[in-house]
Amino acid sequence: MRLTVKNVLKYKILNNAKIVTGKEYAEKRHIQWISAIEMPVENFVRKNEAVLTTGIGCGQDPETFKRFVQDVIDSDASALMVALGRYIFDIPTEVIELAEMNNFIIIELPWEIRFSSIIELVMKEINDIEYKERQKSEKVQQELLNLILKDTDLRGISKFVEKHIGHPLVITDRSGTLHEKSIHTQSFIKEWKKYVLQGILPSRAESTLLKGDPMFQKFQMIKIENRIVFQIPVLQVADNPQGYIFVLVPSSESIESFLTLFRVNVLEHAATTIALWLSRRNAIEETKMRLRSDFVHELSKGEFLSLEQADTRAKLLGYNLKLPYVCIVGYPENMKNLFQKRKQDYDSYEHWLESMIQYIEEEVYYAAQSLKKDILMTYQGEQLVIFLETPGVKGNENATNFLDLVERRLGNLLPEVVISWGIGNAFEGISGFGESFRHAGAALSIGRQKKGFGQRMMYEQTRVDRVLLNLASNKEMEDIIMSTIEPLVQYDEQRHMDLIGTFIAYNQCHGNVSQTARSLNLHRQSLLYRLRKIESLTGLSLIDPDDLFLLDLSIKIWKIGEHAVMAGQH
């Protein structure tokens, strides 16, 4: 309920008042305050304030009075009531035209009406309205507290608040991630995530909606396409938001019509209630997530000696360890680079990374649900470790289909994120968790070396690479390799001729000089010079099969060993 200009004009004391301009707006223009003021206006008139004046100081100068009226209009006052008979005898034509041009209300008052009588009546009605609104909002506050005591879920609380404010509500954590997604459609969730990832929501701006009005200090307004979104922080200790309430309002509705005292009070009570609910829920969820994450981490490290030892904890956490699984390890490659592009929208890299990993995990869970597969997951040491239920232990086609679905969804949500994947062997039994994790990690490392970032590699495809890695770790083999190719490495570093790359191309072309020259875009004589240089530096003949094999093997082992070191440092 609001006090309008039309309501005030119904007072008996104003029977002889006459509305000169803006009659059609009298029912829409509401009054929050009332005051008597003369020149100058300066900043003494507030928005939605009814102004009483005698026009003293304007005398018979219409231009001075017009400037005074313009200042009142600029202050967003509700109406101007002018007492006629001593300083102003008639409202000048140019003032009437100014008011009509600005859709502003001017009311003529008989001189004998006391301003104090009007102010008393208006303030009494404003106080009565505020008292009723307060009573109404206090009732809502009590009902909200009862919902908390009854252990009502966030969906129930949200629906209760929506019923009282008349607009849809969105509740998120501090990063903008939606709570209670079941309230919203899939298309809305996708759209919301897009705004969050673009840094539009939640707003990090310092400015409030109406700085001069203490009632709205906590409110921020964000315009998005055909909507106005009001953002209210859900606070915890030291006034740091632990989440936000967002109210979705059509852009056709004005700020004034939406932000009634009752709605503001309800939203502030809702923020307090939701803060209590989130504090309790977050404590439970964080403990549960930590326990689940720690448990999966222990499984991946092979720290359980028997199924019985692990199964008790697994059942408490909702996991079934008796199913066949395959381990998949994912490594997000470019998180820090992406953060540099968006860091102005986030408090810290850790805060941003937390929300990004949360979105990735959501898509992983969704993919598993779509395929009706059980899943165990943790994010540890910059790696996403996933144990995916698989139909059997003979093939990993299930993991491939799963990653195809994950990457399709991530491609829509996070197209710039690059993730490399390693797929271990499928297994059954408690000992398989640790082994499949190690194999997935080895496949990830080898895949990044051979295929580059953003690719996937299965452990069963790495047999040759594993043979080479084992050879690389042999001390005698290491001496043979280095004595064979060290002269080439040093020469390449000094002259930048890439003799090693030249030999690889020559070997791939089966010793065909013309074909090799074309592939390297070299003149034939330049290639022959390089080949002779390789022979002279290594003391090996490129036409001798044994020498050719030794040089090829040495380069392959050297390269995979070098990449393994680099991957370890990464």
Image (cartoon, helix red, strand yellow):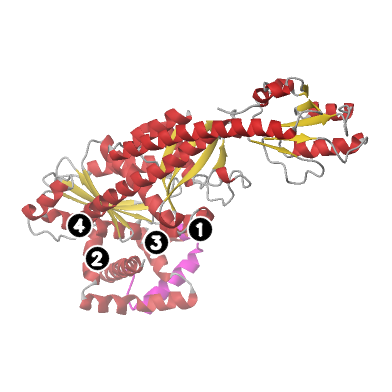
Measured in 3D between alpha carbons, the distance from the residue under mark 2 to the one under mark 1, in whole angstroms, is 38 Å
Left or right of 221? Residue 414 is left
The local crowd at label 2, few if under 14, some if 14 to 19, many if 20 or more residues have their Cα within 10 Å, is some
Using the image as rendered, state which of residue 345 and residue 444 is in the foreground: 345
- Of the numbered discs 1 and 3, the one sitting upstream in the chain is 1
- Residue where numbered disc 1 is placed: 340
- Of the numbered discs 3 and 2, the one sitting upstream in the chain is 2
The quarter of the picture where the C terminus appears is: bottom left
**In this orientation, does residue 316 appear?**
yes
SS of the residue at dot 3? helix
Point out the stretch of residues depicted in magenta.
Answer: 519-543
* Kind of residue indicated by mark 3: Ala
Splitting the image into 4 quarters, where does residue 93 fall?
Answer: top right
The quarter of the picture where the N terminus appears is: top right
- Residue where numbered disc 2 is placed: 468
- Looking at the picture, how far across and down is residue 358, in whole percent? 36, 48
Q: Main secondary structure of the magenta part?
A: helix
